Image (cartoon, grey):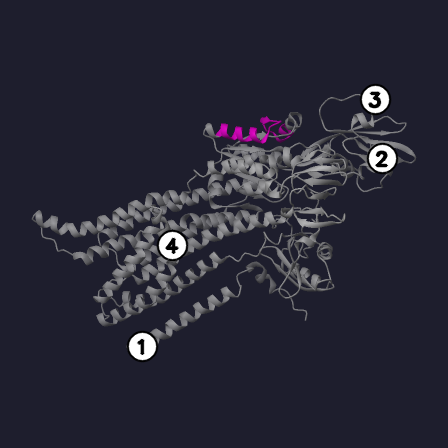
Amino acid sequence: MNIMIVLIPGALCLGALGLAAFFWSLRSGQYEDLEGDARRILIDDED
Amino acid sequence: MADIALNDGAGCPSGLSSTGSAPVAAAARSDLGAFVRRAPSGLDTIELMVSGAKCAGCIAKIETGLKQAPGVEEARLNLSTQRLRVGWRPGASDPARIVETLTALGYGAAPFDPETAQAVVDEEGRRLLRYLAVAGFAAMNIMMFSVPVWSGHDEMGGGTRTLLHWVSALVAIPAALYAAQPFFRSAFRALRARRANMDVPISLAVLLTLSTSVAETLQQGEHAYFDGITMLLFFLLIGRYLDHRLRERARTAARELLALQATTAARIGADGHTIAIPAREVILGDRLLLAPGERAPVDCVIEQGVSDLDLSMLTGETLPQARGPGDQIAAGSINLAHALTVRATARADESAVAELARLIETGEQSRASFVRLADRAASLYVPIVHTLATLTFAGWMLAPIIAHALGFEMAAIGLRGALMNAVAVLIITCPCALGLAVPAVQVVATGRLFKRGVLVKSGDALERLAQADVVIFDKTGTLTLGKPRLRSAPDPAALQAAAKLARASHHPLSRAIAEAAGVGAVADTIRETPGEGVEGTLNGRRARLGRRVYAAPEAKDAADGAPELWFALEGAEPVRFVFADALRADAADVVRALGERGLEVELLSGDRPVAVAAAAGAAGIKRWRGGLSPGDKTARLAELRAQGKRSLMVGDGLNDAAALAGAHVSASPGSALDVSQAASDIVIQGALLMPLVEAIDVAKAARARALENLRFSAIYNLIAAPAAAFGLLTPLIAALAMSSSSLIVTLNALRLQLGKAPAS
């Protein structure tokens, strides 16, 4: 069961990483225009 | 109202129709310069509300189209809010050119008042999302440690279990204390005001559960509720966030409606030049230029000029009134004929509108007695849960003593056991389902209505709408389009001849003739006499179009009270044109649909009784009254309230604002004045009234769903609470019960999305 000493912090770190990623996306305004962003992927880049 | 550009939806490359698009009401024709701001990047920027943008094609068309325009450096369209931000190098372009470019692309645009539309970042929403994310992270990670504890129930050694509990505690304590902040704050506020709300038992449950679970872990006990408490916070925060989003969306939409109506005034400077200023900057005594087609921004008195004024927004009267020097003009009147020089007699916030504000306020107070469904549930719930938890604790403490006194043997579970059971009651009854029951339903319902062009300003508006049993319509601009249409069909030659004069005038009756006749030429040497008519020459013959006494004094008065114009061509018999205020296309259908739903319909109007009778007859409304003042309308509402009836007021004008605020629930069309929209709960976009019927149907369905959800929560608590009180609850059962009940309530709310819309 010694493996748990590695697994528990590892799992928590991965979770925290996800949380940090969410905070970053929130702060950089990625939820401001959900509808527009969903449709922008259909626009071909001209340049 | 003078439109800047309103060719809704014509530009969408996918040809998507414009029903239910975000609102773009007509903004006053004004100098757009007042809306430009200098950005920190050095560019001049303007925020525009775009109508007709629907798809990816629209985004690309607008953004690339604008960026190709000279001087434009930046263009970004937000499809969710329909707002477009354009930036250009100072001097290289101007807002009028940008609006023109947009119009050429096929989209309507109206400016935002930079102050009212200031991009207010939804701070509260972001904070709630952070709490939600932390609670979700904690709940999922702790579940990872809880599942082994549950599944390894018999084989797992006490040491491993305690280790997993400690790791859970390490995550749960900081996360729960952080994520529960909104509940702590709200509970603290309530307690300080010596009240109890739903957040008091929640806060208590969080604190008690955390401390007893730590105590359990310290004593290497079996039951720790770290998973339960974080999951509980996670579900509660979802409900809280949904509720917030609902209110925030309504608030934003209301703010945008106001921003759209932002008016400017043309101030005449000492040197005789006019400059555009925002209406709220007008000060007492300012001399203003009121151009034809513009709406008076403030109360003022005419200094120079004679013109016809459209007062329909103020009084409900369809026909314009002539006004000259020395006459008062109330804010909101529209100048139809000639430019006027006026002197401001009140500031924008003190104008006629402000007088109505007092009436609006009293009306809103009468509405404050309404108690939201969720609050009623909470007021029942809080005392019951607290009593039950206390009884559980007292019961487990006293039962062994009483049993002993009666001669039975019963093992005492001690302070620790009694406290654990009381906490279990608090956790299991914690209002996850209750907290989600109503907001989930209202979010789905308002979202569905929003797509149909109906803007519901608050969740409780939906609850009040479901209760309405009388519908009261205003006539001008609500049941009708507020625009006269030619009713009699004179011979086409006379119509064409009259149109040559009519095209030169802003008078609504002239406009109706011009509209009926189509595009064509204008007569020579036109002269308009306000309040009388238009005069000109047609092929060398003198022609007049106007009132009977002006155009054809010798003709016999028809005396039927209908709006009329006489056209007299030199050497020919005078011709009479008769007009009627055209009903909205679906007005009669809406009245019938309301009747089918058991609602009474009434028509209350400030217009002349003759005109009101005609409109009531055409729409199929049996009860109507004309010639009413704003006070008469509110009096009628009070009368209905005294009879125990709940009224839905539908109106658009300034004369309806007080009635809108005083009714049990109110709605206004998107073309209504800003004060009226501000005073009403529901705003309907588009030219049709049928969405109102759908709103009533959805409101009733939403109420039924919300009641179902509350009933389900009650049943769930009836089963779970006694189980917890008797000590049968384990953390596993608590987790399962909480998540399944929340899920059921949410799924039930989603059923609303499946309902069919009434045929329109």
Query: Residue B562: horizontal and vertical position, in percent?
Result: 71, 26
Which chain is indicated by disc 2? B
Q: Write down the region rendered in magenta.
A: B615-640
**On the rendered structure, is B144 left or right of B297?**
left
Q: Nearer the viewer, mark 3 or mark 4?
A: 4
Location of mark 4 (residue): B185
Q: Is residue B117 above or below residue B707?
A: below
Mark 1 secondary-structure assignment: helix
Separation of marks 1 and 3 at Cα, in angstroms: 107 Å
Judge whether residue B132 is colored magenta. Answer: no
Separation of marks 3 and 4 at Cα, in angstroms: 79 Å
Mark 1 and mark 3 residues within 8 Å of each other at the beta carbon: no
Give the amino acid at mark 2. Answer: Ala
Residue farthest along the front direction in this orientation: B270
Query: Residue B309: horizontal and vertical position, in percent?
Result: 71, 36
Separation of marks 4 and 1 at Cα, in angstroms: 38 Å
Mark 1 and mark 2 residues within 8 Å of each other at the beta carbon: no
Location of mark 2 (residue): B497
Q: Residue B559: which numbered mark, if any?
A: none
Q: Is residue B673 above or below residue B578?
A: below
Q: Name the quadrant of the N terminus of chain B.
A: top right
Q: Residue B554: which numbered mark, if any?
A: 3
Q: Is residue B702 above or below residue B312?
A: below
Separation of marks 2 and 3 at Cα, in angstroms: 20 Å
